[in-house]
Image (cartoon, helix red, strand yellow):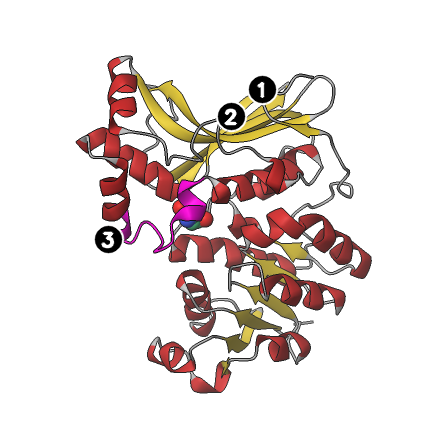
């Protein structure tokens, strides 16, 4: 028996949303039918090639209307959080790339998803199109995960790479990244480490079974500037003279007492190490598993087409009856959390 296609409503048609809509309109997926797209600017969306009949500026209507699955790609905290919660509460599966919402409201959204048996999938929220959450939740579920270390923000890695290569200042490298489209007009979430902290919270949920308190993830050593904002051309020159590079490393591990240690910090790594050789907007995650050893994943961590890939894979998974991104992991627990410099 052939199943009717899943009716898909997409909220947001920015860099990622536009690509998802384009793929759905091209009908590459027989099991998915695009039934609506909510946007802020209908004229611009039409100019981008989205048929007028699909467009609305009322996302809540799409969530409440005749759709089987909601794809949330608006970004930002509200109204995205409320719309995701409403869809899950109404029993509708949700696919989202919204790391900001998941990092702050993941525990609550997981509770609603489990209560209503509504799948919540979010592979696109970490490392863009490079699959890593399913890997942690499913493929590595049989090993004991002990630590994660990663470059999970492409914008900051691009800026650090350019500063090291050209000797330019942080301010000039940021300006150049913005001009080239690698940094947002408001770059604070990237350069101050907030975006990487959001992703670390999601990774830790998959690896260690608890949603961390995002606000308690340090993004600087005490007394230092957040993220990469305090890194100077001189710091990079001095590091290179000693055979090292500086990378914004998001790390988390389970301490012997069971607490989860987490931080996002500019860190020195050997120039000739895999992290040192991870350049530009590429991302890399190293996973320590017992007794497996180190497993590493590297790939594009941002960009519309790459991230849309993860969204479409999640949609196909839902069409094929798969559950949430946490797979068969037990419900999230709570955990003690601390900074690397806090004593046990
Ligand atoms: N600004 C983010 C980054 C986009 O640079 O990694 C992808 O999450």
Marks 1/3: CA–CA distance: 37 Å
User: SS class of the residue under badge 2?
Assistant: loop
- Determine the image quadrant of residue 62: bottom right
Mark 2, other Cα within 10 Å: few <14 / some 14–19 / many ≥20? few
Mark before the other along the chain sequence, 2 or 3 = 3
Quarter in which the C terminus is drawn: top right
Q: Is residue 4 left or right of residue 295?
A: right
Give the mark toward the camera: 2 or 1: 2
Q: Is residue 189 magenta?
A: yes
Left/right placement of residue 41 relative to residue 333 reads left
**Tag 1: Cα neighbours inside 10 Å, few (<14), some, or many (≥20)?**
few
Mark 2 and 1 residues: CB-CB less than 8 Å, in contact?
yes
| Residue highlighted by disc 3 | 179
Task: Decide which of tag 2 and tag 1 comes sooner along the chain.
Answer: 2
Q: Residue furthest bottom?
A: 53
Residue beneath disc 2: 222
* Residue at 68% over, 55% down: 322
Asked whether mark 1 and ligand 1 are closer than 8 Å, the reply comes as no
In this rendering, is residue 95 above or below 6? above
Query: Which mark, residue 341?
Result: 1
Q: Determine if the magenta segment contains residue 317.
A: no
Q: Quadrant of the N terminus?
A: bottom right
């Amino acid at each position: 028996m052939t199943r009717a296609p899943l009716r898909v409503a997409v909220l947001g048609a920015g860099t990622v949303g536009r690509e998802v809509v384009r793929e759905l309109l091209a009908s590459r997926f027989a099991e998915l039918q695009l039934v609506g797209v909510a946007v802020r600017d209908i004229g611009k969306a039409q100019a981008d090639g989205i048929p007028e009949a699909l467009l609305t500026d009322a996302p809540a209507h799409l969530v409440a209307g005749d759709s089987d699955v909601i794809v949330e790609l608006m970004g930002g905290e509200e109204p995205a959080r409320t719309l995701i919660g409403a869809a899950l509460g109404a029993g509708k599966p949700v696919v989202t790339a919204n790391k900001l919402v998941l990092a702050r409201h993941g525990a609550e959204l997981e509770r609603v998803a489990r209560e209503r048996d509504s799948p919540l999938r979010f592979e696109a929220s970490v490392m863009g199109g490079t699959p890593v959450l399913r890997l942690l939740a499913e493929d590595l579920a049989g090993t004991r995960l002990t630590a994660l270390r990663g470059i999970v923000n492409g914008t900051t890695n691009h800026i650090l790479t350019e500063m090291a290569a050209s000797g330019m200042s942080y301010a000039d490298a940021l300006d150049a990244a913005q001009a080239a489209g690698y940094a947002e007009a408001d770059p604070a979430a990237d350069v101050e480490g907030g975006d990487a902290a959001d992703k670390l919270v999601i990774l830790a949920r998959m690896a260690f079974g608890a949603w961390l308190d995002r606000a308690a993830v340090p993004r600087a050593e005490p007394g230092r500037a957040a993220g990469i904002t305090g890194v100077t051309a001189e710091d990079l020159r001095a590091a290179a003279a000693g055979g090292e590079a500086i990378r914004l490393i998001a790390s988390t591990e389970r301490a012997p007492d069971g607490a989860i240690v987490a931080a996002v910090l500019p860190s020195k790594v050997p120039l000739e190490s895999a992290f040192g050789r991870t350049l530009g907007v590429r991302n890399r995650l190293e996973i320590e598993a017992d007794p497996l050893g180190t497993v590493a994943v590297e790939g594009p961590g941002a960009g519309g087409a790459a991230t849309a890939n993860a969204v479409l894979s999640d949609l196909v998974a839902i069409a094929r009856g798969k559950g949430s991104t946490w797979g068969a992991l037990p419900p999230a627990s709570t955990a003690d959390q601390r900074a690397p410099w806090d004593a046990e």
